[in-house]
Image (tube, rainbow, N blue to C red):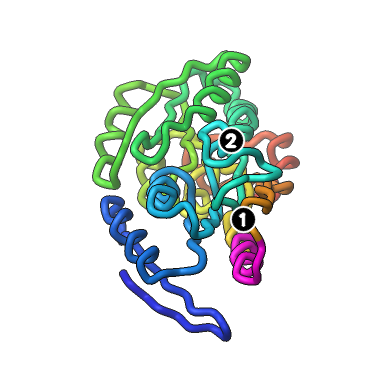
Amino acid sequence: MYTSYLKGDFAMEFRSTEGKPERVPQLVADLVQLPVEAILVGVCGTQLNVARRATQTIPIVVATCNDDMVETGVIASMRRPGGNVTGLSKLTPELAPKRLQLLKQTVPGIKRVAVLWNPAYSDFKADWRETLAAAQLLGLSIHPVEFRRPDDFDAAFAAIARERVDALITFSDALTYVHAKRVADLVAAAGLPAMFPFREVVDEGALMSYGPSLTGMWHRAADYVVRILKGANPAEMAIEQPTKFEFIVNLKAAKALGLAIPQSIRLQADQVLE
């Protein structure tokens, strides 16, 4: 989808893959050729990697990065990125232990946890490291289940059923976010308590989420773009990290699963959906 939008002194060019990630290279190439003065991408992984290959000069702002940007070589440091990429980090790997801990506190009897993840989106190296370390401390076994496209969700949940797991977590990838309703429905059909990195899946009926507000991060990313258009150098714009995290619990989902949410979890929750 191609859309142009004029707002005051700024002209914005929107490009959407419409659910077809193979279109990313051509869409990015179109933006570079216009040319634009800054590129805003939603996430790290494929979108950012393609944009970085397409240009080393046009500033790139990442709205909600899921990877460790230093470890993956995207930037030199969080304080001084050093290239043409800047933006915001979701601190996804660092939050993995907390997500597993909250899931374990909510359902103390769990032992086997499936991790639904998309290797075509990112290798999630840091997420895996933090998740496996936290699982070991909590006495949980981890069972990876892959998907790469929306068409893979049914097969992935069939694989999860074969693993006979007690609960589910996911890493922070765009397809889970975009297809929140479908994922929530599949989790409900599987009868699994599940923890997500963003609340959108919980709003659609899943049990719980823990992470920063993605809406708030997009608002902050817009500020980064404005500052760049006014002359700021992305190489010197520190990567912003969230300081507030939302813990959302869905009581309707808990009831459907036959779970009684512990009072300790209710007290920790920022919002309890009735």
Q: Position of residue 144 (x, y in %)?
A: 39, 25
For residue 207, above or below residue 218: above
Q: Residue 272 location, x and y as percent?
A: 65, 50
Left or right placement of residue 161 versus residue 8 in this view: left
Q: Amino acid at mark 2?
A: Val
Magenta residues span: 220-232
**Amino acid type, mark 1:** Pro
Q: Label 1, on which residue?
A: 234
Pick the residue in front: 176 or 127: 127
Q: Quadrant of residue 107?
A: top right
Q: Of circles 2 and 1, which is in front? A: 1
- The residue at which mark 2 appears reads as 70
Q: Secondary structure at mark 2?
A: loop
The span from disc 2 to disc 1 (Cα, nearest Å) is: 15 Å
Which residue corresponds to the image point at 56% horizontal and 31% vertical from the top-left? 71
Front residue of this view, candidates 78 and 18: 78
Element type where label 1 sits in the image: helix
Q: Using the image as rendered, state which of residue 233 and residue 191 is in the foreground.
A: 233
Where 135 falls versus 233 (above or below)?
above
106 to 75, vertically: above or below: above
